[in-house]
Image (cartoon, grey):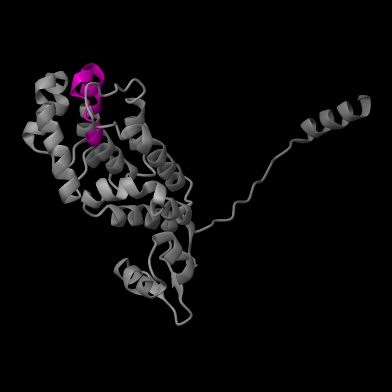
Amino acid sequence: MVAAAGWVQPETRTEQIENLVSGVDRYNPNNVGILEDYLYRQIRTEEYDCLANLAILKLYQFNPDLYNPDVVINILIKALTSSPFPDFNLCISLLDQRPTIQNTDEPDPLPTLLPILTTLHNLLQQCRFPAFWALYRSENAESLRDNYTVECVGFEDAVRRVVVHAVVGAFRRISSERLASYLHLDVEDVPEYVQKLGWTVDAGGVISLPSNPDNQPVSTVVQENVQLSQLTKIISHAQTA
């Protein structure tokens, strides 16, 4: 997860990309190749720059002849692991009027993969992690895995970080079996994984998480002060009703 400042201007963004994202050259179609190269650097290095990727989609929107479905799919894959932030939906909002490839023997893979990516995003948003992994590992998502996420360095680890973020906010204690299903790990691999997070595992395989404002329930006492004059009006109204 990233802070707002890091989302607006990641430390890994070069001065050249900053000028393209923030300046008037943002809408210059001649610069799309530079932004696409930057995207593929993100794919290879686990970096992420949502605003730069949105700039690509905006250029595609204004210049349909530039449209590259592989680039769009990779942008959505990177945005997928930004959950629970709205990056994926921001990208989708720029695809409503997406063009279709003409005069090519290669079919457009986006119409087939977009429903799968959207469902995967929804499952992450709903914290239905076992269902996410089941779909991601299914035959339906084979093309996504074999042609795209296999090239995206650290994709599954990035998904697991989304899971960890949700678990930290919801649990004080969780069984190793349950967490393993969330992380798509073997149960025997869970202790080593959680120890790197600073969590502890007891002899029974129960994992304890540090307390934080989200996973520490606090009782709330609600006290209402009703003046005698108000109570008299309520009683009088009840008698005349």
In the displayed orientation, state which residue is furthest to the left: 16
Q: Looking at the picture, how far across and down is residue 230, in whole percent?
A: 77, 31
Q: Which residue lies at the image location 39% right of the left edge and 70% below the top edge? A: 186
Say above or below: 225 vs 219.
above
Q: Which residue lies at the image location 12% right of the left edge and 27% below the top edge? A: 20
Magenta span: predominant SS is helix
Report the front residue among 15 and 31.
31
Q: Looking at the picture, how far across and down is residue 63, in whole percent?
A: 20, 18
Which image quarter holds the C terminus?
top right
Q: Which residue lies at the image location 44% right of the left edge and 70% below the top edge? A: 208
In the displayed orientation, state which residue is furthest to the front: 105
Report if residue 175 is visible in the image: no
Q: Looking at the picture, how far across and down is residue 5, in whole percent?
A: 24, 39
- In the image, is 21 to the left or to the right of 142? left
Q: Looking at the picture, how far across and down is residue 46, in whole percent?
A: 20, 50
Report if residue 200 is visible in the image: yes
Q: Which residues are magenta?
A: 57-71
In the displayed orientation, state which residue is furthest to the bottom: 203
Report the front residue among 105 and 46.
105
